[in-house]
Amino acid sequence: MDRFIGILTVERGNIQPEETVLIEGTGGVALAGLQIASLRGATTILTTSSGKLEAASMLGATHVIDRQTQDVAETVLQLTAGKGVDHVLEIAGGAHLGKAATMSAVGGKIYLIGALEGFDVSSPLEPLIFKDLTIYGIGTGHRHALQRLISACDSKGIAPVIDRCYPMASLMEALEHLQSGAMGKIVITVAD
């Protein structure tokens, strides 16, 4: 899925250095998005829980919002001087799409990547219409886009953020760790 984020945000979204990208969470997909947005020189705003604030900053987020103690939408609007963000990596889905629309700038782009809050998305109509937002669903991209992404990551030394590796025998433990909120990817080794 990480490669799709790169294809969407770079190929379709054309993230520019003067733009702002909102990344929701610190899972593997979110952190891949952070790395790609940072590679493009964009200002990044990452939301996470209290226990991960310092680590998120160390990974290069321009701004980190503690979603447990701060109003995310209000803080995003403050950080962008009321404009909103140019790009949102929407991982939650469900009714959270409406929050993404509220935090978006006029002409903003929302990349609907996940469905953690459900497959039935909803949003107030007003920000979708009056902000002229574009919503991209995740899908596959073309081979040349993937090759450019891999080349860019290789040349800049970008690698996936790995939280922890587990042997196949510890699959249930790995899944529990993933459910509890991993910081990056969980890797299952199937052979030595």
Image: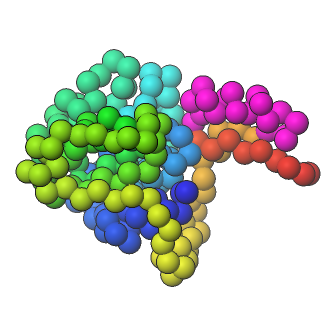
Q: Farthest bottom residue?
A: 144
Name the image colouring: rainbow
- Residue 116 x %, y %: 47, 37
Q: Nearer the viewer, residue 104 or 16?
A: 104
**Magenta-span inclusion, residue 102:** no
Q: Is residue 177 magenta?
A: yes
x 29%, y 22%: residue:
70
Q: Quadrant of residue 63?
A: top left
Quarter holding residue 184? top right
Figure quadrant of the N terminus: bottom right
For the view shown, which residue lies furthest in the right direction?
192
Q: Quick check: can you spot residue 36?
A: no
Dominant secondary-structure state across the stretch colored magenta:
helix
Residue at the extreme front: 120
Answer with left or right where residue 140 lies relative to residue 110: right
Task: Looking at this view, name the residue that lies furthest to the top.
Answer: 69
Give, as a single range, the part of the protein colored magenta.
166-183
Is 94 displayed left or right of 52 in the figure? left
Is 144 in front, or is 133?
133
Q: Position of residue 174 (x, y in %)?
A: 73, 33
Q: What's the residue at 72%, 45% (across, down)? A: 187
Residue found at x 57% / y 30%:
181
Tell me residue 27's x, y (percent): 53, 40
**Above-or-below relation of 58 to 21:** above
Front-most of residues 183 and 62? 183
Q: Is residue 190 visible?
A: yes
- Which residue shows up at 34% across the image and 59% down it? 136
Question: Considering only vertical position in the picture, is 127 above or below 138?
Answer: above
Q: Position of residue 152 (x, y in %)?
A: 51, 71
